[in-house]
Image (cartoon, rainbow, N blue to C red):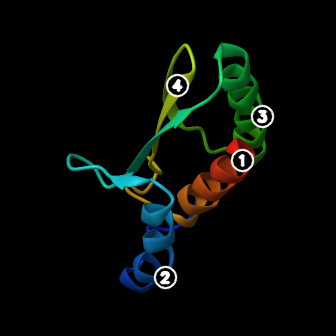
Amino acid sequence: MMSPKLTDAERTNHLPDLFAAGWEPMAERDGLTKTFTFADFRAAFGWMTQVALLAEKMNHHPEWTNVYNRVTVTLISHDVNGLSMRDVEMARTMDDLAG
């Protein structure tokens, strides 16, 4: 399910809240990145499992790396080569699941 690239108005409406929550714009791509830190590996991996199940439902998969208790995430909609509402929704849900 394709979602169009964010418009300027959508960026103005949605991105400031994500930036306030710790998401950062990427210099080299029209994407977002954030590093989540958990108590330990089990907590990090549990969160990744929850996100993976959501990603399958959304058919929208993050780029991520995990080192012990840290998960660094990149969100970008490859089909539009930039940010879409799927990225905004995924970022918000990741934040909610991370508590």
Q: How busy is the neighbourhood of tag 1: few (under 14 within 10 Å), some, or many (20 plus)?
A: few
Mark toward the viewer: 3 or 4: 4
Label 4's element? strand
Residue 33 appears in the rendering: yes
Q: Quadrant of residue 33?
A: top left
Mark 4 lies on residue? 70
Residue position for label 1:
99
Q: Mark 2 packing: few (<14 Cα in 10 Å), some, or many (20+)?
A: few
Question: In the rendered image, which residue does mark 2 sit on?
Answer: 13
Q: CA distance from mark 3 to mark 1?
A: 13 Å
Amino acid type at circle 3 is Gln
Q: Mark 1 and mark 4 in contact (Cβ < 8 Å)?
A: no
- Residue to which mark 3 is pinned: 50
Q: Name the amino acid, label 4.
A: Arg
Seen at 47% across and 51% down, the residue is 77
Query: How far is mark 3 from mark 4, CA to CA?
Result: 15 Å
